Image (cartoon, rainbow, N blue to C red):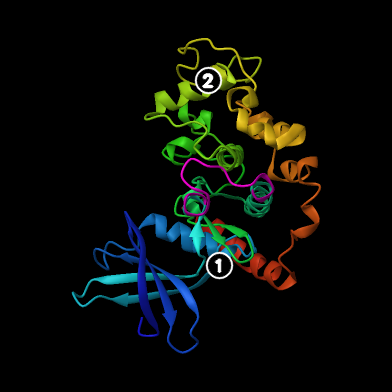
């Protein structure tokens, strides 16, 4: 990595660290995601392989751009992998806290614009058979100059196909996890991402997580207290999930009656939010349907859904690779 000078540690997690860095020849600022490999024999962690494979196939202005992948070696001799990303100023969580204060929502128009861009990124992913599975404010990166927001961190991303495979339910940070996953389903689809988008839209408005349980059980109870305990009429086939009926019987409430700050969304915004937060995944609606909501009528013309023919051609080349190497 002699071409880059690391200038700041941005964060660290299970699989390594993220640095702000500058390319020595061009001066370009990037983000370096460093993953230390235990040995060459053990190979690259599955989350890193997923992220690289997926991001090489996705090219959208609403998805963080992977510039290059560099295999290097530490002084200790251990192999290390660097993912070089475009640099963005903040994640959504940092942006909300540093700009508006903890527990304070962002302006409704900005929340609408961010939500529209998130949905454009989500539509692109889903149309390329990719589930993100870990949408949360910390995984949405913002360019503050242009108020552009992009999907990032595809370490839990997954390519899906038909027939639907059985997936692990250990996905998505608890507060943004869809109820079907909390109830233990192994068969899920793009609706899990749509639930997360709904939670994020609400959080942008009210300034705090919509449902914030300390465990899977507490998270389910928090959801059911507001949206009602599911029945076979409100959620067809819920009876196929384990212990679906073993919860207190609550009646559904209107979101804006429980969280009064949500009233700024207006009739169209509240209808969109209710759709994305429908307990039944089959009634939740797609990213395309959400984008067509009249809630976005006054901002839709400001954003392009297209990535250009060059990107589209590149996608066709990579689609077979990512499907053949499903992780």
Secondary structure beneath label 2: helix
Labelled disc at residue 30 = none
Q: Is residue 98 magenta?
A: yes
Q: As displayed, is residue 231 above or below residue 305? A: above
What residue do we see at 78% from left, 44% from top? Answer: 292
Viewer-nearest residue: 251 or 177: 251
Question: Is 297 placed left or right of 239 in the picture?
Answer: right
Q: Is residue 204 magenta?
A: no
Rounded to the nearest angstrom, the CA distance separating label 2 from label 1 is 38 Å
What residue do we see at 43% from left, 60% from top? Answer: 49
Viewer-nearest residue: 177 or 41: 177
Name the residue furthest top. 249
**Residue 284 seen anywhere in this rendered image of the structure:** no
| Disc 1: which residue | 65
Viewer-nearest residue: 220 or 180: 220
Q: The N terminus appears in which quarter of the rendering?
A: bottom left
Q: Position of residue 311 (x, y in %)?
A: 68, 69
* Label 2 Cα crowd, 10 Å radius (few <14 / some 14-19 / many 20+): many
**Residue 119 seen anywhere in this rendered image of the structure:** yes
Question: Is 7 placed left or right of 41 in the picture?
Answer: right
Q: Which residues are magenta?
A: 96-110
Q: Position of residue 83 (x, y in %)?
A: 43, 69
Callout count: 2
Secondary structure beneath label 1: loop
What residue do we see at 61% from left, 32% from top? Answer: 261
Q: Position of residue 303 (x, y in %)?
A: 74, 59
Q: As displayed, is residue 73 above or below residue 170? A: below
What residue do we see at 58% from left, 63% from top? Answer: 144
Name the residue furthest left. 76
Q: Position of residue 86 (x, y in %)?
A: 52, 70
| Disc 2: which residue | 224
């Amino acid at each position: 990595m002699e071409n880059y000078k690391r200038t700041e540690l941005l964060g660290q997690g299970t699989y390594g660290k993220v640095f702000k860095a500058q390319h020595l020849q061009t001066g370009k600022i990037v983000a370096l995601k460093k993953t230390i490999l235990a040995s060459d024999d053990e190979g690259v962690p599955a989350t890193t392989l997923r992220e690289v494979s997926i991001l090489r196939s996705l090219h959208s202005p609403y998805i963080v751009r992977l510039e290059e992948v560099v295999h290097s070696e530490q002084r200790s001799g251990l192999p290390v992998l660097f993912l070089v990303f475009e640099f963005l100023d903040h994640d959504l969580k940092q942006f909300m806290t540093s700009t508006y204060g903890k527990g304070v929502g962002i302006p409704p128009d900005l929340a609408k614009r961010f939500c529209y861009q998130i949905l454009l990124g989500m539509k692109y992913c889903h149309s390329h058979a990719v589930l993100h599975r870990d949408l949360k404010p910390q995984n949405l990166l913002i360019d503050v100059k242009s108020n552009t927001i992009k999907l990032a961190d595809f370490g839990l991303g997954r390519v899906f196909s038909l027939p639907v495979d059985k997936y692990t339910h250990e996905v998505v940070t608890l507060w943004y996890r869809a109820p079907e996953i909390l109830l233990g389903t192994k068969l899920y689809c793009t609706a899990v991402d749509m639930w997360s988008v709904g939670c994020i839209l609400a959080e942008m408005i009210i300034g705090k997580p919509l449902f914030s349980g300390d465990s899977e059980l507490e998270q389910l109870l928090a959801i059911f207290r507001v949206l009602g305990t599911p029945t076979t009429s409100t959620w067809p086939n819920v009876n196929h999930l384990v212990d679906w009926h073993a919860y207190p019987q609550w009646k559904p409430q209107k979101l804006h009656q429980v969280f009064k700050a949500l009233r700024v969304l207006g009739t169209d915004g509240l209808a969109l939010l209710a759709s994305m937060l429908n307990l039944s995944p089959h009634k939740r609606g797609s990213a395309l349907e959400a984008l067509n909501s009249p809630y976005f009528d006054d901002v839709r013309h400001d954003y392009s859904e297209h990535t250009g023919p060059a990107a589209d051609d590149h996608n066709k080349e990579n689609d077979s690779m990512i499907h053949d190497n499903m992780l």
